[in-house]
Every structure is written in C-alpha cells, then in structure tokens.
Image (cartoon, rainbow, N blue to C red):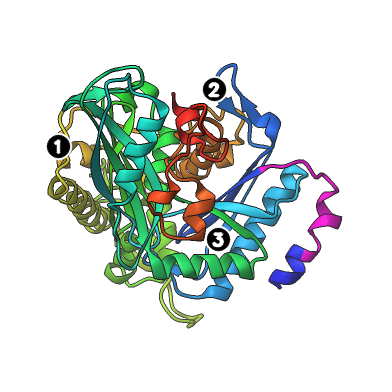
Amino acid sequence: MIGLLRDKKADQVGSAKSPAVAALDLGQSKVACFIMKPDGVRRADNTIRVAGAGHVQSKGVRGGVIVNMEDAADAIARAVERAERAAGQTVSGVVVTSSIGQMASHRVSASVSLSAHPISDHDLARAIGAALSKISLPNRRPIHVLPVAWSVDGARGVHDPRHLQGRTLGLDLLVISMAEGAFSALSNCLERAHLDLQGVAAAPLVTSLAALEEDEMELGALCIDMGAGTTSAAVWGGRSLLHIESVSVGGDHVTADIARGMTTSRAGAERLKTLKGSAMASNNEDREMVEAPPRGEDASAGPVVWPRAMLKTIIAPRVEETLELMRDRLRAGGMRIDPGMGIVLTGGASQLNGVRELAERVFDHPSVRLGRPQRAPHLAEAAAGPAFCSAAGVLLRAAYGPREAVSAHKLMARHVTAADAPRVNRGGVISRAAGWLSDNF
C-alpha cells in the first residue's frame, strides 16, 4: 500500500520540480503534513503561505512511542500524499515534528579566553566548539543545539558579543535530545514511507514558534502543547528557548477514562468528550442526560445513559493532574513561572471546554490564552486551529529561524562533537556551511 501511494505521486500531482519545505506532524491522534513552496516566505510581513495541507488519523503511535512501524508509515504516506495533491508539488523528504522519544533539554556552558583584540567571529566559533565538546548524552540523540546566552567577563545578557572586549567569553547552549532508539524507529518509519528524514523538530519548540508573539518570547512565556498521547511545554525568555519538558499523559488518557467510567467504547468516549465534554461545571448538567454506544457488538443492546455531570467528574481530575504534573516537572527543572509570564495552550486537547480555566488555577496565573498558528494567515479553517501549531511552526522555523549551532544534516548523520562548530576562514568570513553565526547576527 505504501509503495503504491508513493510510486503514483508524479502522475497524480504533476511535474513541479521546484524545492519545497515539508513539515510532518506525527502524533498519536493525527498525522499532518504542511508544504511550503519557496515563494511562501513573505518577508515583507514575516508571514508564510502554506501551499498544501493534509491530515489523516494516526496509527501505530501510542504513548509517545512508534508501536507499529507499518501502520505509522502508511499514515505518514497518506498525509503527505494529501498535502502534495493540495500543493501541486511532490516532496522527497520531510522535517518531522513530534513528542515521541522522551524529549528533554540540557544546558551546557563553556568559556574561552580572549586576546586583547575585540571579540571576533572566530572567538564565537571557539566558544561554540568548547560547549559542543561537553555534550555527552549516552543513548540519546541531540536534535537541537541552540545558543541561549552569551556573557563577557561574567556579564550576562549580551545578545551580540562581537566587537566587545574582555578576558573571557561565555556561552550557554540548550541541547534538546530524544532517545536513540526512538530516533532510529522514526528514521526507519520514514524510509518505509519512501521519504527522507531531513530533520527532527521537537514539538514544544516549533509549536511555540507558531503560537507565541514576539513580545511573549522576549518578556517570558510558557507554551503548553496538549496532544493526544503527550503533553509538552516550552519556556521562553529574552528571545531564547530556555527549557522544554514533557509528560506522557494527554487527551487520549481522558478518552480512556471516559470509556472506563461510562462503560462505553473508545469511539463513543471520544465523541462524548468532543461534543459534550468539559473540565468545568455548566448549568443544568445534572438534569441533562448523554448517551453513548455500549461496548461489544450486541445489536440488541441499548445505549448507555448518564448525567452529563458525570463527564465533568471524569474529565476535570485527569486534566488537572496533567497540568499539575507539568507544573511540578517545570519546577524541578528550575523553571519559575511567575505571574508576569504569558501562558499559552495549544494542541487538540487544549480545545476542551474548561481547560484554560483549570490552567489558570493550577499555575496560579491571571490569564491563560488558547494559541493558534500565528503568521500563517492563509491557512484553511480546518488546519488553522491549536492542533496544527506544530506543523506551521516547522515552516516558520525554516523561514525565519532560530538558526542552530549545528546543522540539521549533521544532527541527522551522527552525534555532535566540537568539530561541528562553525568554521571561519582566514579572512574572518564564516564559511557557508556553518550557517548559524551569519544568520543570527
């Protein structure tokens, strides 16, 4: 089936050959693909235009793990095919965003001595190399290496240290990694779908790029992505990503709780959650009754009937527990969420009634908003909701950054070392392959 889908694409879509960027959001409930052509980058207003979008029900992914390679590959191929049809453009590879693989972030610090001359590109490259040499993550694969902060003689908050003078140059890197086994499974899955894995983007990073305003990234913000199988979060401050966190609990756990508590099927529970579910009490819910199909295939069995209030008593504790787990994980990681920070919810599970109000209570925060893809104004309504922030964020990152200290090609090929730092030629000009320094200053 997969081979047939991919082999027919040239005839079905056309002969368009211009390069394009394809983002694939691999989740537990859906697989979505967004395609952006080169003319989709609108620098005049820092927006993008998505040429084609496609999404299908996910299969083969459960609890942040690929559990059935063939099913997952088939879903990926079908989502990409739908996006290609809509875009009139074939793609050979994709950048995958996902929360699989127990993604986590690690801070690495390093410093280098300076000469009497002003700080140059060469000094920045040396600092990056020194930090890269300290990365040691057994059985984990780095997928992002992001400079967070520079310092000169211990003075922090330096955005561009070039042309300053001092005795030492310091650098903090944020390294985001995933389990090596999960990376290998993802690579094999894409190969089965006849697609090249061009990069892996952590869902918390790209989701926040799509959902947050620039002021929020500068002043401080927490973006919580509530998916079906995983809830992840990204903390921003000073225009830099500071930390990511993930818990293996999501909207699908709410569905399972409803199925157990109301003795209905998972499909029936999902429908109840979507149409009638809420994490907060509503008027007349004690008198309103809801129906759901019974379990099993007995055609003579009637529907199960419960007061709608029963839904709230099942949904609210699970959502509250999920948010509390995230809050406690962030605190354990040294992240302080103060009232001045923005809190933004994304992901399909965030759309459930009452989730925003529960988040305000759990985080003791005066205002929590629901996030949608920013700077992608031409998305169709079906692909413009909170559940599609990750796919849009991959395209925004490709267009506008942030650029990284190590290229995606090197991250996909092997573990990073000091040799992967940006290189500067004798004339002081950064080589084209380095990328990061020239793109970020």
Please give left or right for residue 373 compared with residue 38 in the image: left
Front residue of this view, candidates 215 and 437: 437
Asked whether disc 2 touches disc 3, contact meaning CB atoms under 8 Å apart, the reply is no
Q: Does the magenta stretch include residue 366?
A: no
**For marks 2 and 3 on the same chain, the one whose residue lies earlier in the sequence:** 2
Q: Where is residue 410 in the image (x, y as percent from the top left)?
A: 50, 53
Q: In the rendered structure, which amino acid carries the disc numbered 3?
A: Gln
Residue 336's tag is 1
In percent of the image, x 65 and y 61: which residue is there? 195
Residue 46, numbered circle: 2
Residue at image x 32%, y 72%? Answer: 263
Q: Mark 3 points at which residue?
A: 57
Give SS at disc 3: strand
Is the Cβ of the residue at disc 2 closer than 8 Å to that at disc 1?
Answer: no
Quick one: label 2, few (<14), some, or many (20+) residues within 10 Å? few
Residue span colored magenta: 7-20
Does 398 appear above or below 96? above
The amino acid type, in three-letter code, at marker 1 is Arg
Q: What residue type is labelled 2?
A: Asn
Gap between marks 2 and 1 measured at Cα:
31 Å
Residue 112 position, x and y percent, is 25, 36
Label disc, if present, on residue 196 of the rendered structure: none
Is residue 84 at least partly visible in the picture? yes
Tell me the crowding category of disc 3: few under 14, some 14 to 19, or many 20 or more residues within 10 angstroms, Cα based. Answer: some
Q: Which quadrant of the figure has residue 162? A: top left
Residue 146 falls in image quadrant: top left
Vertical placement of residue 46 versus 296, above or below: above
Q: x and y percent of residue 17 in the render?
A: 80, 45
| Nearest to the observer: residue 89 or residue 319 | 89
Q: How crowded is mark 1: few (under 14 residues within 10 Å), some or many (20 or more)?
A: few
